[in-house]
Amino acid sequence: MVKKNKRGEPAKPAAGRRWRYLFLGSLLLVVAAAGSLWAYQKSLVEPLAIGEDGLRFEVASGGSLSKVLDRLGEQGVVTLPKAVLLYAYWQEKTGIHAGEYLIPYGSNAMDLVERLHTGDVTRYRLTLVEGWTFAQALDQVRAGRNIVKTDAAADTLSAAEALGFEGESAEGWIFPDTYIYRSGTTDIELLRQAYQRMQKVLEEEWQARSDNLPYAGPYEALIMASLVEKETGQPSERDEIAGVFVRRLNKGMRLQTDPTVIYGLGDEFDGNLRRVHLRQANPYNTYVIKGLPPTPIALPGREAIRAALNPKAGDTLYFVAKGNGYHHFSATLAEHNRAVREYQLKRRADYRSSPGKEN
C-alpha cells in the first residue's frame, strides 16, 4: 500500500533515502568507470596473443595505425584496438612506418605502438663480394630476401642506365660490402646505394693518393684497383702487386694479367685459360693491348683501391703464383722465368692460386 501524506498525495522518500539512492548510483558509475579503466590498462600492459616465434606482419605504404590495430584486433592479437589507439593519441605516436615487423613474444600493446611509431622494422643483410662482376652483384641483389624486383634492373644494361650509365659500363662501380635493408626495398634502390658508396670511397682514397701515379683520374685508379683485386691471393700482397702494375705502366710495358683475358673472353671462357687466349685480340686482353683495359673487370674493395693509389715502392716487374696462395715477385725476366719453371711448370700436388689464410 502506497503511503500518502496529509493532503492525500503519495509520500516522498525521506531525505536520507534519496541520498542513499544517489550514493548507490554514483557508486555504480565509479565501479563501471573503474572497470573500464582496469580493462583499458589491462589491454595496454598484458602480453599480446602471439606465439613464441613472435608475430610477423607487413604494413603497406600509406597504412594507418587505426587499420593495423583493427586488423590485429580481428586476428585476436589485440584485445581492445580502440583503447590502444586512444593510448597512441595520448602519447602522440599515431604516425607509423611502412615495412615488415616482427613483434617478439611477450610484447604488449605499448611495445607494439612504439615499434610502429619508430619504424623498428625487420632488416635484412645482403653481401656483395670483392672481385665479383657487376652481373654477379646484380643477380645477388635481385635474389635478396624481400627485395622488390623492378624492370629498371631486369638486366645489366637496364640497371646501368637506371644508375646513370647510359651507353657506358657500370662495371666496377658497385661497392662490395654488406648492406642492411628493409622489406620492400627495390633492387635498383640497393644498387644505387652501393654505387653512391663506391663514389664516396673512391673520392676519399683519391684524396689520400701517392704522388706521381700514371692515372688520368679516379676512374683509371678504379680500373687498376679491379686488376689488383682479381690478382690478389693474400691481402698483404695488394700494394706489392699494385707496385708491379704501376711500374710496368710507367715503363710502357704491357700488364699481361690473366684476369683481364678471362674477363674479355666472357662466356667463351670455360675455366681453362689457354695460350691461344693470350694471343686473342680484344679490348681487355692486356697481353695484346698497352695500358689499362677500358673498364674495371670486377668490384674492387677499399683495400684494393687504396693499394692502387698507394703502390709499394720497389723494382719488381713480374710475379707468378706459387701455388700456396702467395706470389713470387721478380725484378728481372730471367728471375721470373726461373720462378715460372719452379712454380708453374712443376706444380705441386696441392697447388692453388685462390686466396688462402695468411701464415
Image (tube, rainbow, N blue to C red):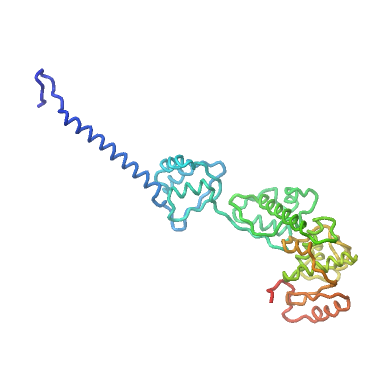
Q: Nearer the viewer, residue 175 or 266?
A: 175
User: Quadrant of residue 253 in the image?
Assistant: bottom right
Give how far across and how far down residue 67 sits, in percent.
48, 41
Please name the residue shown 34% across and 42% down the image: 37
Foreground residue among 306 and 253: 306
Quadrant of image for the C terminus: bottom right
Q: Is residue 330 visible?
A: yes
Find residue 152 and report its horizontal and vertical position in percent. 70, 48
Q: Residue furthest right?
A: 252
Compared with 51, 29 (above or below) is above
* Point 16% across, 31% down: residue: 16
Image quarter of residue 141 = bottom right
Residue 281 appears left or right of 239: right
Residue 267 visible here: no
Q: Quadrant of residue 223?
A: bottom right
Q: Position of residue 357 (x, y in %)?
A: 68, 74
From the viewer's perspective, tell me whether residue 332 is left or right of residue 16: right
151 in relation to 280, above or below: above
Residue 283, compared with residue 234, is above or below; it is above
